[in-house]
Amino acid sequence: MRRIFLGCEIGKAPSNPSTDISKNITGTVTFSTPMSTETQIPDNSSAKPTIADARAAIAATRWAGLAIIREDGTPTIRPIGCFAPSSTGAQADVYFSTPRDSAKDKSLRKNPVVNFYFEPPVAEVAAYKGVSLIGKVAEVPADSPEYPAAVSALSAQSAFFKARAESGNLASTIIYRIHASELRYSDYALYHAIMEIPLSQPVLG
């Protein structure tokens, strides 16, 4: 574990309270204080996260943030509650659904490059995990061979989506797939820095 060392200069207080004390600094004191147990981060930089670690963090996330560019060119982050890792193709790809012809849908059609951020809920900073998935989105057409697998994956994650799917009420819903080009992983229990996960590595577990 590490200690934080803070240095500061101190001096006698001026006799005139209105005098700027910074002009009367005469000495130096250095002290150390240990990091709290909530913020201690071990040095485990030799460990390497896997795609399986990222998928587990995604599965543990209830609400994710989708960073997109709006039609007017300004950035925004939209909350997404219905998402699931794809079971085909690149191991890091993710499905999500959104209302068809919504402002979000129109923005994605104009600029499909996104950053999807997943953050499982934790009680302490030391247990923080996060996954940043960067890539391009593409619609999964309802008449494509992939569509049933996407519906199944999203139904397993979202009871609301499942109810709509079973009632045949998905006509107003569009399913997107993020084709991942970059995957970054944070785990404060293991790493000092955000770690990039190669997308070519096999899924473990």
Image (cartoon, rainbow, N blue to C red):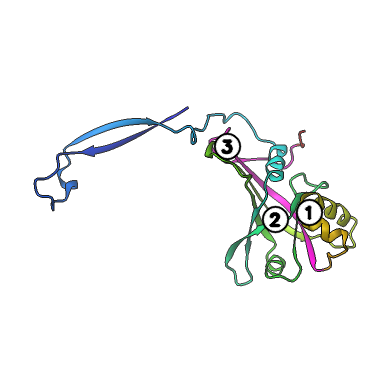
Density class for disc 2 (Cα within 10 Å; few <14, some 14-19, many ≥20) is: some
Quadrant for the C terminus, please.
top right
Residue 145 in the magenta stretch? The answer is no
Where 50 falls versus 72 (above or below)? above
Report the residue at 88% width, 63% height from top.
Answer: 168
Lower position in the chain sequence, tag 1 or tag 3: 3
Q: Mark 1: which amino acid?
A: Ala
Where 32 falls versus 135 (above or below)? above
Pointers 2 and 3 in contact (CB under 8 A)? no
Q: Mark 2: which amino acid?
A: Gly
Secondary structure under tag 3 reads helix
Which one is in front in this view, the residue at disc 1 or the one at disc 2?
1
Secondary structure under tag 1 reads helix
Q: Which residue is mark 3?
A: 127
> In the image, is 43 to the left or to the right of 63?
left
Q: Which stretch appears magenta?
A: 172-201
Density class for disc 1 (Cα within 10 Å; few <14, some 14-19, many ≥20) is: few
Identify the residue at the far top of this view. Answer: 1
Q: Which mark is residue 159?
A: 1
Q: Which mark is residue 199?
A: none
Report the residue at 16% width, 47% height from top.
Answer: 23
Separation of residues labelled 2 and 3 (CA atoms): 22 Å
